[in-house]
Every structure is written in structure tokens, then in C-alpha cells.
Image (spheres, rainbow, N blue to C red):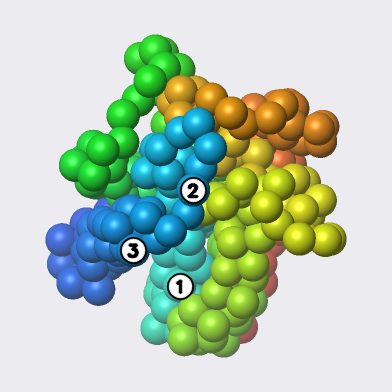
Amino acid sequence: MISMIRDATTIARRNVIRISRVPEVMVFVVIQPLMFVLLFAYVFGGSIDIPGGSYREFLIAGIFAQTVVFGATFTASGLAEDVQKGLINRFRSLPLSRSAVVAGRTASDVVYNLLSIIIMSLAGFAVGWRIRGSILDAVVAYLLLLFFSYSFSWVMACLGLLVPAPEVVNNATFIVLFPLTFIANTFVPSDSLPGILKPIAEWNPVSTLTHAVRVRFGNLPAETPEPTSWPLQNAMLYSLGWAILLIVIFAPIATRLYQRTGKR
């Protein structure tokens, strides 16, 4: 176990170093979160009314949730690139723990997302967002975001080991992640969604993650009605349950895929 942690830490360090050496990674980590905050705050902020609250404060938790979910794609594209370049076979020739490569890759996503969250928080403060809850509640909100992003990275690890090229990863992830993050309460209240979209949004784990973060930050509008769906009523528990379930299911699958991919 100790050797696996040591090996995974080495792999994670290798992936984090790429932030300063690959300009494209730096753009995603730094500029994209900043762009989302400014775009939604100033372009949509004046046209979306949030009764009893500020749209900019309502918005930030949704952007946090969307960014950490999209940030998990670093694992998928990184592993697909390593497979394509033959690095997986080189890793297999080294005395590394069986799960260290995948574990290190998913751990490095946490660092990417931490940097993104810091930048988004600073941008949010610049456009008028404030944390209204306690410091402890804010810390819990940030930790929940990072833990959920880590769990989702294991899903992306499986995808990265299955697809033939990094370019395919981008297309495949956007097809899944855009509906997941937009059919939710990330940018508009779920009550405003029509028909079947409303219950889908209420049971969407991205919605519960967003709601839990809003509550912890104290950014829930004063006139927001009490949630009627069980997931939103128990947003923290539901989000943690999903995160743990994703790790339990996809971590063993990703490890097996890594072993199988390396033998091709």
C-alpha cells in the first residue's frame, strides 16, 4: 500500500509538471474558468432574474460544479495520449504498483481543479460574489467539489483507456458532459425547467452538488422554495453517495483496463 501511494504520487507529480510546460493545459486550467465566470456574470447576469437574490451569487456554485466535472477530462485525454504514444507500455516495464499510473493521473486532476477553483473564486469576488456562510462551511463546500471531481476522474480514466485517440476523448466527453451540466440547476433554478427536464435536473448529481455548495456558501436566494425532491433535500448526502459509488465502480474497472491496454 505504501509503495502504491509513493508510485502514484510520482505519477501525479509528473502530470502536474505539465501545467507549466504545456500551454494548452494552462489555458484550460486558468483561462477557461475565468472566461466562464465573466461570460455568465456579464452576458447572462442581466437577463436572468433570481427572486430574492443575486444571479452572480447564484451562478458561482454552478460554474464551480461544471468546471470540476469538465476538469476530470484531463484524466481521459492524458491516458489516451499515453496509450497512443506507447507510454503505458513503458510504465508497465517499470517496477510500479498495478494501480499507480491511473491513481496518479486521477490525483493530478485534483490539483488542476484546485487551481481552477482558486482562480474562479478570485474572479467571483471581482464580479460581486461573496461567501455568506461560515469559514468551516466554505471549506466543506470546496472539499466536496474536489472529492466529486476526483470520483468523476475515475469515470474519465475508463473512457481514456477505451478510446483510440485523445481527439475522440474530447468529442465523447462533450456529448456526455454538456447535457449533464446544463440539464441541472447550475445556471438556472431547476423549477424553471419544463416538463421531464425538471425531475431529471432534480435527480442529477451535478444539481445536488451545486445545491449543496450554494447552501454552504450561503448563496441560496431568500425566496427559494424548499426542495420537494429527495436528492435536493439531502444534497450533501446524495452527492457524497454518488462520489463514493463512482469510485467503487470505476476504480477497479480502470485498473483492469490499464492492465489490458498495456498488453496490446
For marks 2 and 3, the one nearer the N-term is 3
Q: Which residue is mark 1?
A: 77
CA neighbours of label 2 inside 10 A, class few (<14), some (14 to 19), many (20+): few
For marks 2 and 1, the one nearer the N-term is 2
Q: Amino acid at mark 2?
A: Asp
Helix, strand or loop at mark 3: helix
Q: Which residue is mark 3?
A: 43
Spatial separation of the CA atoms under disc 2 and disc 3: 13 Å
Which residue is at 81% across, 36% downward? 229
Nearest to the observer: residue 73 or residue 188: 188
Q: Is residue 38 visible?
A: yes
Q: Image check: 209 left or right of 23?
A: right
Nearest to the observer: residue 240 or residue 84: 240
Helix, strand or loop at mark 2: loop
- Image quarter of residue 237: top right
Q: Which residue is mark 2?
A: 49
Which of label 1 and label 3 is nearer to you? Answer: 3
Q: Amino acid at mark 1?
A: Ser
CA neighbours of label 1 inside 10 A, class few (<14), some (14 to 19), many (20+): many
| Tally of numbered discs | 3
